[in-house]
Amino acid sequence: MSTQGLVTFLQLLSLRPGLLGRGPRGASSLCDAGDPPSHRPVAAVADLYERFLAPLSSLGDHRSFTPLSAHGPGCSGSVPARSNVAAWRIGPIMWARTGAAAMSSPLFSLGRAASHGAHAVHCHLCLSHAPLDCYHLAVECTHPIIKVWRKRYESALRRLVAKLTVVIRSERERAGAEQEDRLFSRAARAARRADLNTAQGDFLSFRLLVAHPWPERMAQPHMRAVRLLGRVFDLVGVYHRFERPALDLWTRWSLRWLWRLSSAWRRANAA
């Protein structure tokens, strides 16, 4: 679907709000980077997509393509699907986005026919009252083996952002897109200096792990790294062949660290 066609479709929905329903129960307001994702599968996915309440302006003003932060049919934001990585390999990223349901996937199921679904199963590794899902393991769990994974992951995250901003900038230059003075270096520097033991750090850690870009508007006032990286993702889009190097880099990195989290999870359960 073209951007113009999607705009028309969404305009029709705004005139007839009952056409597709109102989304998940409780999805009554836009979420921001300070809100942790729900552990309930439907709501967890909705949280990644701003609870399906993104404004029409998020599609940008170009006739042929949308910003990388725009998600939906025909939009640019589906990083794994638009990469060169084979479809059968990107399953872990899709599973990790589904809240507690991810714990029943081959990534975390430990070979058992577990079925967490929408139920709040508490993490038995750190004995916390937090629902057990990929988000909890990535940013909250205090088990020593998971903490070792997180320390290595956070170092790799900063390196990813530095490399990702360089690739996006160079490919946009190659595409002839208008350059943003200092934006890319400012975004990389903000990510390098960000305290990852904060709400901003939790957002960055999870969103980068599941390869899901975000818009600048999701950032709270104090979230400089979220805001600047969101501004990068909001830039006027370029043709897919110029986006693909960054998408390939991000997708392969996410898969690598999700499988390493899976390995850490299995070792922690065996300890």
Image (cartoon, rainbow, N blue to C red):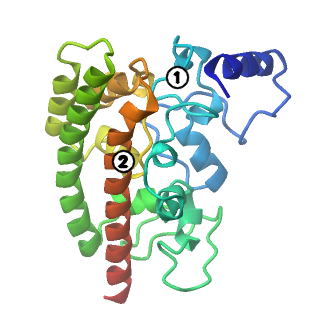
Expressed as whole percent of the image width and height from the top left, the position of residue 166 reads 20, 33
Q: Is residue 33 visible?
A: no
Against 231, is 117 above or below?
below
Q: Nearer the viewer, residue 120 or 113?
A: 113
User: On the rendered structure, is 238 left or right of 174?
Assistant: right
**Residue on which disc 2 sits:** 248
Picture quarter containing residue 9? top right
Expressed as whole percent of the image width and height from the top left, the position of residue 3 reads 62, 21
Residue located 64% across and 74% down the image: 115
Residue located 38% across and 19% down the image: 235
Image quadrant in which the N terminus is located? top right
Q: Dot 1: what SS? A: loop
Q: Dot 2: what SS? A: helix
Q: Is residue 159 visible?
A: yes
Against 216, is 49 above or below?
below
Residue located 42% across and 17% down the image: 236
Task: Kindly identify which numbered label has been placed on residue 65.
Answer: 1
The kind of residue on which mark 1 rests is: Phe
Picture quarter containing residue 224? top left
The kind of residue on which mark 2 rests is: Asp
